[in-house]
Amino acid sequence: MNIKLNCDMGESFGIWKMGNDEEIMPFIDMANLACGYHASDALTMNKSVALAKKHNVTIGAHPSYQDLVGFGRRSMLCSLEEIKSIVLYQLGALSAFCKMHNTGISYVKPHGALYNDMMKDENILKAVLSAISSFDKNIKLMVLSTPNNEANKHTALVYGINLIFEVFADRNYNDNGTLVSRIMPNAVINDELAITQRIMNLRDSAYIESINKEKLFIEANTICVHGDNENALEFIKLLKKALH
């Protein structure tokens, strides 16, 4: 597999600093840039786009529910029209800075609860796809790869959108291919050897192991490491080495 590394970036807000973007950006292929609803602000978006362009990193929009206090990790009871509108709003905000720096948005990866809700509810997935399609059909949508990707591929094609299938390097999986909830103590993997072995299995044999050691055979275009993980830089260097 030709697997690219992606990372959630640009998540600082005002005087509050999140992540280590300057050091991480040179080692990744794709940057998921926050758009102001779960994190980031105008100045941070501007700096993040400039940093991504400097290192020739593909830019993705990272929209979320409007939830700065909860960092976008709480589901919100939004109508489908609201979801379409908030995604479109955030695409527009990030696109303005991309235009200023003579670059563009290549894909969308919803953040946190919006990402999880999109993967559980086809109507929310359709609302996100509709927003992207109305903005620019050349923009792809990044989704969680599972053993059953065909249904999502079919839904996306109805809107003229192509999908990017993502695997998480530092998150544990349930046996059905979903992510272990962050409310569980074993949701995040911090062991470097375990993460390296997972990526080697994916690279060489196209599977990852679930929390119960079940083999999940999945398509993977990209691997995510969270920028707010305290070991993110070290993990990304390890993954870069393992992939190549």
Image (cartoon, rainbow, N blue to C red):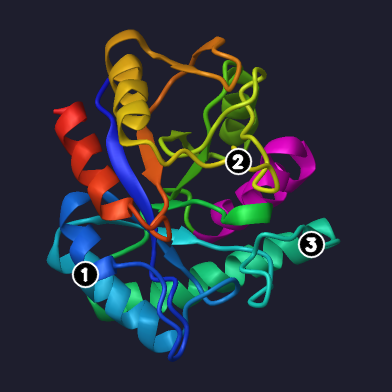
Question: For the magenta stretch, what is the residue range?
Answer: 114-135
Q: Are marks 1 and 2 in contact (CB under 8 Å)?
A: no
Task: Name the front one of labels 1 and 2.
Answer: 1
Circle 2 sits in a helix, a strand or a loop, which is it?
Answer: loop
User: What is the crowding at mark 3: few (fewer than 14 residues within 10 Å), some, or many (at least 20)?
Assistant: few
Q: Which residue is mark 1?
A: 22
Q: Please state which of residues 150 and 195 is positioned toward the viewer in this rendering.
A: 195
Separation of disc 1 and disc 3 at Cα?
Answer: 36 Å
Q: Which residue is mark 2?
A: 159
Q: Is residue 148 left or right of residue 81?
A: left
Kind of residue sitting beneath label 3: Glu
Circle 1 sits in a helix, a strand or a loop, which is it?
Answer: helix
- Which x, y percent locates residue 33? 41, 64
User: What is the crowding at mark 1: few (fewer than 14 residues within 10 Å), some, or many (at least 20)?
Assistant: few
Kind of residue sitting beneath label 2: Tyr
> Does 239 appear above or below 101?
above
Main secondary-structure element of the magenta-colored stretch = helix
- Which x, y percent locates residue 232? 32, 52
- Give me the residue at 37% from left, 67% from top: 19
> Does 190 appear above or below 36?
above
> Does 168 appear above or below 201?
below
Task: Name the quadrant containing residue 55.
Answer: bottom left
Q: Is residue 20 left or right of residue 56?
A: right
- Give me the residue at 37% from left, 60% from top: 105
Q: Are marks 3 and 2 in contact (CB under 8 Å)?
A: no
Task: Name the front one of labels 1 and 3.
Answer: 1
Sequence-earlier tag: 3 or 2: 3
Task: Name the quadrant containing residue 90.
Answer: bottom right
Circle 3 sits in a helix, a strand or a loop, which is it?
Answer: helix
Separation of disc 1 and disc 2 at Cα?
Answer: 36 Å
Q: Which residue is mark 3?
A: 81
- Give me the residue at 64% from left, 24% from top: 174
